[in-house]
Amino acid sequence: MESQIQQQEYTTTPEGMPASEPAGTLALPPAPQSNTQLKKLGAQVRAFLDELPEYIAKFYNENQKPITVAILIVAAFVTVKVVLAILDALNDIPLLAPTFELIGIGYSAWFVYRYLLKVETREELGQEIQAITSQVVGSKR
């Protein structure tokens, strides 16, 4: 019954109104737009889009260092988030986290036995650290 009433409301419309609009609303005629206004607007948009690469290149050349720093900060943030998500996913796998802990404890025990128990091996470790530091930072003369 309701669908027939609603259907009657939509089908009995005044002249010029679409059949999908309710009978109580009035439709406004479309606003007159001249072709010249549309052509002017199209020409302005086209000119802006043609000059856009030049604007971007000029902006980048003027602000190259801050843009690079901002991109590197965002990349570092995204990298940290991805690494943390991967570690969290690995931590949720059963028996994997305790296995990694055992591997870490084993490596730490080997490192202490290999490098820290005797004087000679501690000196060897110190020399290796100095060699790596001089390679990274540069040698002192």
Image (tube, rainbow, N blue to C red):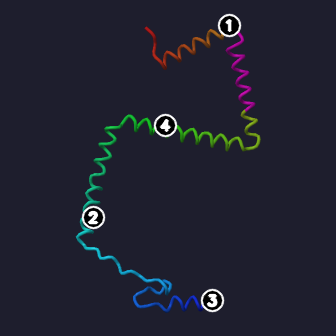
Give the CA separation, mark 3 to mark 2: 49 Å
Q: Please tell me whether mark 2 or mark 4 is closer to you in this view.
A: 2
Q: Residues within 10 Å of mark 1 (few under 14, many from 20)?
A: few
Q: Kindly identify the residue that appears in the image at 53 percent across and 89 percent down.
A: 9
From the image, give the main secondary structure of the stretch colored magenta. helix
Is 134 covered by the magenta stretch? no
Which type of secondary structure does the marked residue at label 1 adopt?
helix
In the picture, the disc for residue 119 is 1
Please report whichever mark, 2 or 4, sits nearer to the chain's N-terminal start.
2
Magenta span has 112? yes
Q: Magenta stretch: give its range.
A: 101-118
Determine which residue is flagged by label 2: 42
Q: Quadrant of the C terminus?
A: top left
Looking at marks 4 and 3 on the same chain, the residue that comes earlier in the sequence is marked by: 3
Direction from residue 101 to residue 58 in the image, left or right:
left
Q: Earlier in the sequence, mark 1 or mark 3?
A: 3
**Can you give x and y, in whole percent of width and height, for residue 124 in the image?**
61, 11
Disc sitting over residue 17 in the figure: none
Give left or right: position of 80 versus 58.
right
Judge whether 17 appears above or below 59 on screen: below
| Crowd class of label 2 (few under 14; some 14 to 19; many from 20; radius 10 Å) | few
**First-in-chain label (4 vs 1):** 4
Query: Which residue type carries mark 1?
Result: Val
Give the quarter of the figure containing the N terminus.
Answer: bottom right
On the image, numbered disc 3 is attached to which residue? Answer: 2
Q: Quadrant of residue 130?
A: top right
| Closer mark to the observer between disc 4 and disc 1 | 4
The residue singled out by tag 4 in the image is: 73
Please tell me which of labels 2 and 1 falls first in the chain: 2
Question: Crowdedness of circle 4 by 10 Å Cα count: few (<14), some, many (20+)?
Answer: few
Residue at 40 percent of width and 38 percent of height = 67
